[in-house]
Image (cartoon, helix red, strand yellow):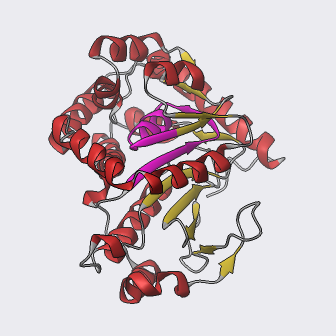
Amino acid sequence: MTAITGASRIQAERIARCGSNGLAGCFATRNESNDPSRTTQTFDDLNFRELSVEYDRDEKALIYHAHPRRRPCFTAELLEEIGQVFDIVHNVCRCCEDERDLPVRFLVAASRIEGIFNLGGDLDLFAIAIRTRDEKALKHYARLCIDRVYSNAIDLGLPIVTISLVQGDALGGGFEAAISSDVVIAERSAKFGLPEVLFNLFPGMGAYSLLGRLVTPAIAERMILSGRIYSAEELYDLGVVDVVADDGQGRQALFGYFRRARRQANALRAVHQIKHRVNPISYSELSDVVDLWVRTAMQLGETDLRRMERVAAAQNRRMARYYGVDRSAEG
C-alpha cells in the first residue's frame, strides 16, 4: 500500500497510538444517521480532498465516502487517499493483540455523489498517456488501481469484512472496485457495467479475476465483451450483489447488515476465511493482467481514443449537472 506522508502520516500515527479503546475519542462526534441515538466519529482533520471518513463506534465500522472534485472516477489523487485510509485501518488494528478488541470490523466504500458510486478509470489520463507514448505513466496508474483492489479483496490482511455500498452507477473500474469487497449492497436503481469494449479496450484492474470467482469465466467473459449495463437485481440473481435495497435506503440496509452480522459473527468470519482459502486471488495474477492491459491500451488508435474522450466528456457533463457548474477544469 502507498505510504502515508505529511499531515496524514502524523494523523495515522496518532490514531495508532490511541489503540482500540481510544479510537472513538480521537475525533469530534457528528450524528451521520437518521437515528438520533446513534453517533459516529468523523475524521475531519485528515485533510483529505477527494473523500471523507466516518467511524461508527457502536458497529466498529469505518466508512469512506468518495467525493472527487473533478470527474467521479478513480483519479490518482483519490487512489492515493484510499491507500491512506487502508494504512490507517491497518495501523490501528495491528495494535490489538486480541481480535475481539479490534476497533474496525467493517470497512465500507461509499460515495457522496448522488447517483454515482464511481465511473471507473481516469480516461483523460489514459488518452494523454497513450498519445504521448508514456507507457510508464499508464503502468503506474494501473498499479495504483490493483494495489487498492487487491488490498480490499484480501480485507487488508485483517479479520474484517469489506463492504461496497453502491447507491448509484458503478461502471468500469467502479464496478471492479465494488465487487472487490466481501459484500455488495446496492440500491435498486444502481447500474453496473464494463463499457471499456466501446473504445476497443478491456477492464484490466480485476474484472475477469473477480467476476470469474463470483460467477463463471464464461459469464464473466460475456459481461466484459458485451459492454452491457446490468441492474442491481440482475446481479443479485447472478450472485454478484448480496443485498438490494430500495432507493434511498442503502444506508439503512448497511446498518441492517451490521446487526445481522453481529448475530452471526462467528459463522460470517469463518465463511469469509473459507472463501479466501478456497478461491484466493493473487497479486501476481492481477499484475499479469495489468501488464497485458497496458500493452493493449498502448495499441489503441486515434478513433478509439476519440471514443474514449467522448465518454470522458459525458462524465464531465454529468458531474457539471451535479455541481450546477462546470468544475471539470479544476485541479
Query: Residue 6's spot in the image, x, y percent?
Result: 42, 81
Residue farthest front in this picture:
263
User: Between residues 80 and 129, which one lies in front from this camera angle?
Assistant: 80
x then y, percent, for residue 207: 36, 29
Quadrant showing the C terminus? bottom right
Count of marks placed on residues:
0
Q: Position of residue 87 (x, y in %)?
A: 35, 68
Q: Which residues are magenta?
A: 161-184
Q: Tell which of 171 and 190 is nearer to you.
A: 190
Q: Is residue 258 left or right of residue 190?
A: left
State which quadrant residue 180 falls in: top left
Q: Is residue 184 visible?
A: yes
Figure quadrant of residue 79? bottom left
Q: Is residue 295 above or below residue 3?
A: above
Picture residue at 32% right of the left edge, 64% below the top: 2
Splitting the image into 4 quarters, where does residue 223 fall?
top left
Confirm whether the magenta stretch covers residue 164.
Answer: yes
Residue 144 visible in the shown view: no
Quadrant including the N terminus: bottom left
User: Residue drawn at (57%, 69%), measured in percent from left and top?
Assistant: 56
